[in-house]
Amino acid sequence: MTSIEERLKALEDEYQIRALADSFADICISGNVQCFEALWIEDGTWTLAEPLNIESSGRDNIAKLFLKLATGKRFFCQKLHSGIITISGDQATARWILSENAANHDGSSYQSTAIYDDRLVFEGGRWLFEARHCKFLDISHTGNNS
């Protein structure tokens, strides 16, 4: 049987990892690139699979990719639906099901359903993304998509 301290630590870790994923989604709306950059370890990797086929490595490059993706958007809203977290010491994995809605200034918009598979590390007293891999299950476009 695990001690009360071990169980409390496990609960705190899971809470902090959920808060990290929630922060990612919240920052997608605010567009705050400095806050977004702070979610990652220095040599993190962010992958957006088909149809985007984009991979960015390094905290600075990830922030630049975020800024590029946010440019031209009227809004981008990411909604987490569920998450499964597995913690092993100072490392963890997580899997999130999510949906996204976005509208561009040109009148076009899109919706997507996706899965994020994450690797996380406890560094500097907090959980950070080491790697995020997004697999899109569906993307639907409307409006002016030229």
Image: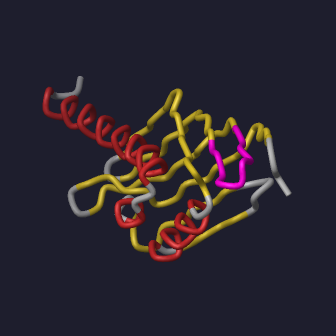
- The quadrant in which the C terminus is found is bottom right
Horizontally, residue 75 falls left or right of residue 140, namely left
Res 68 quadrant in image: bottom right
Which part of the image, by quadrant, shows the N terminus? Answer: top left
Q: Residue placed at 71% from the left, 54% from the top?
A: 106
Left or right: residue 14 versus residue 53 is left
Q: Which residues are magenta?
A: 102-111
Q: In percent of the image, x 52 and y 59: which residue is there?
A: 131
Residue 54 image offset from top left, x and y in percent: 70, 65
Left or right, 111 with reference to 10: right
Quadrant housing residue 26: top left
Q: Residue furthest top?
A: 1
Q: In the picture provided, is 63 more to the left or to the right than 65?
A: left
- Furthest toward the front, the residue is 106
Question: Residue at image x 49%, y 41%?
Answer: 94
Residue that sits furthest to the right in the current view = 146
Residue 15 in magenta stretch: no
Query: Depth check: 19 or 74 in front?
Result: 74
Task: Say which residue appears at 42% left-offset and 51% top-offset.
Answer: 30
Residue 96 drawn at (x, y percent): 54, 36
Name the dominant secondary structure of the magenta segment: strand
Q: How many marks?
A: 0
Q: Quadrant of residue 73?
A: bottom right
x then y, percent, for residue 113 = 68, 35
Task: Residue 80: give x, y in percent of width and height.
Answer: 51, 33
